[in-house]
Amino acid sequence: MVGRFTYSRWDGTQTGFDMETSDLFDELADDLLNNGDLRGALRRFMERGARDANGEKLQGLREMRQKLKQARQDLLDSGDPNGVFQEIADALDDILDEERHAVEQSVRDAEKSGDERRMDNARNAAMERNFRLDMMPDDLAGKVRELQAYDFESADAQQRFEQLMDKLRQQLMEKQFNQISDSLKNMSPEDMARMKEMMKALNEMIERHNRGEDEKFEEFMEKFGDFFPENPQSFEELMEQLARQMQAAQDMLNSMTPEQRQQLQELSSMLLDDMELQNEMAQLGANMQAMFPGLGQGEGYEMQGENPMGFEQAMQTMKDLADLDRLEDLMNNPASPQQLAEADMDRVRDLLGDEVARSMDKLSKLVKEMEREGLIRQRDGKLEVTPRGMRHIGSKALRDIFSRLAKDKPGQHQQHRFGQGHERTYETKQYEYGDPFNLDLQRTIRNALRRAGPGTPVRLSAEDFEVERTEHLTRSATVLMLDASYSMYRDDRWGPAKKVAVALQSLMSSQYPRDYLGILMFGHLAWEVKPDELMEATPPGMQGTNMHHAMATARRMLASQSGNKQIIMITDGEPTAHITPQGDPWFTYFDGWDAQQLTVEATLREAMRCTKENITINTFMLDADQYLVRFVEQMTSMNGGRAFMTNAHDLGNYVMVDFLDHKRRTTRGGRGRRAS
């Protein structure tokens, strides 16, 4: 099926593109290089979020919490829950005014008739009714109690009072269940009987659960599902919904004054006077309290608005505030992105808007998406970067470094001439970033047919590209030595240094696959780091800068290699440790000038051994310390290598320019050594 596309001018209303999983993985790269901790990098990424090149934003938890804080304040400012009583009081006052007007009208009508007996009866009835109306209690519960026993003159006023009582009964039941369903509206005696039946069945279902029996949830929902429009799909989900609703009701009570709570309780007892119903409601409360021990606790919310709230608005506000509290708990330091999937994204959208819901949903799927892309994996209960993910990070590190190079520098290291210095190997490889685009068309088309099946037209994808591999006539062998002393980590130099190692490894594997690259870290001692260990490698926090041991180890690594050999050393301090003739490490930093000189001399002797074995040492200094500069000057004058004074920001540029310059000179036949 041929895809069809239409194009139109951008008018600002079209939505942008979602950030690709690989783009989000790129956002983790520098953090991973700095700290070597994938889970920690994911947590920090969740906090800060991201923005892609098109300006598309993925909100982080820090920004989401700010929006949640504002949403909570807006709710607290939205009204006064004590308006529940004001709403009832205003309705009762209107009914009383209508009744008084009807009483006066009955007297006037009697007087117009001219019938003395009728007038006397009307005046006596009016006097009695006005006395009862004047003596109405001030409190709502007392006023409702009196009106229930009052003989109305006005049929309309009586009807309005009965409708108000029905509404209050409905709202008081909603206070328990917080359900806005047809089952609780305009409740008739038959509806009340069915409500009691539902309550009894609900309690029985909970008791079956407590006994470890089948709850018969489906049977219950088939009969009483109309009471629960949120449509829970399991017994546990129903209980959680009920617990949230009952907590919202309690929060509303806790937000009122003690006098107002007493008024509401009296109204409940008066209007829900069915003993069987009250017993079932009490039993349900006890059952829910047993299942959720913290249910009903809390101090309510300090509402700060001035506009009176009705029952429905107050209940919904309490539920919204409680949901915001739960959402905030979820946002506070989740152990992993998957934990965010516990949030109801529709509810997040209602409370915080589309952008927050979209960002949270994207974050919750982040790990699964990266696993699906083959960038990370779970192994032995640990989340780790895959070899493909490492190549991706290396490619990004390479792009970052080359993107900062000036135009007169070697640039992206794409060599477009394949004559002098290269020969065809008649081998091919899958295209990777940075490869010369010397396409092997036959193999590329074969890959596309294998992927998509036979037929025309043949549709090519980037993964189908296969390019010819070329071989350098002059092979190089390099050992990269990274200073892993404490000061590198303390002064934020470790991440940029490690980024250079990852980028160089990526460059070598894609452009110079027949060259050798070894990587060493050195502190109190030196140790080799394999490519699959590099991502998680971190400074061990040991004191000492043992260049002596590092150079000796690098020299042994290069001994079995052919071609032009070099050491690239990245450091921020002079040598402060060496290996004694007995093979023990000796840290001399606190042992005075003479001990320091022993370390310097041992290191220079090792540099001389490297020189005799035709190993060039190029040094990149990240600190202008005079002792380091003096030592490096001595070493470069002896070895013939080069020395660079740089900083963490420009380190990658310096190393790559020098490395590629070295490759050019060795490819043209020179040995590659030049004085600094």
Image (cartoon, rainbow, N blue to C red):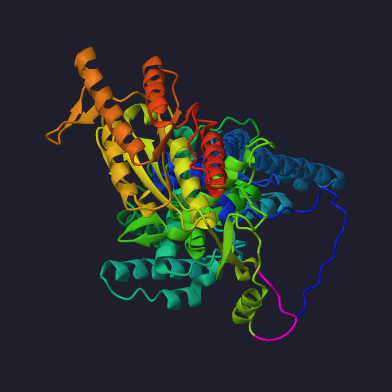
Q: Is residue 309 left or right of residue 638?
A: right
Identify the residue shown where x is 55% and y is 31%. Answer: 650
**x and y percentages locating residue 674 in the rendered image:** 50, 33
225 falls in the magenta region: no
**x and y percentages locating residue 33 in the rendered image:** 44, 42
Q: Is residue 30 visible?
A: yes
456 falls in the magenta region: yes
Foreground residue, 467 or 348? 467
**x and y percentages locating residue 90 in the rendered image:** 66, 39
Identify the residue shown where x is 51% and y is 32%. Answer: 302
Q: Is residue 355 left or right of residue 607?
A: right
Q: Tell me which corner region of the image, top left, top right, bottom left or bottom right, holds residue 211.
A: bottom left
**x and y percentages locating residue 225 in the rendered image:** 52, 71
Identify the residue shown where x is 36% and y is 21%. Answer: 631
Foreground residue, 9 or 362? 9
**Residues rendered magenta in the picture:** 454-461
Foreground residue, 140 or 432? 432
Identify the residue shown where x is 77% and y is 46%. Answer: 106
Q: Is residue 522 visible?
A: no
Dominant secondary structure (helix, strand or loop) of the stretch shown in magenta: loop
Relative height, residue 604 to residue 86 (above, below): above
Q: Residue furthest left?
A: 582
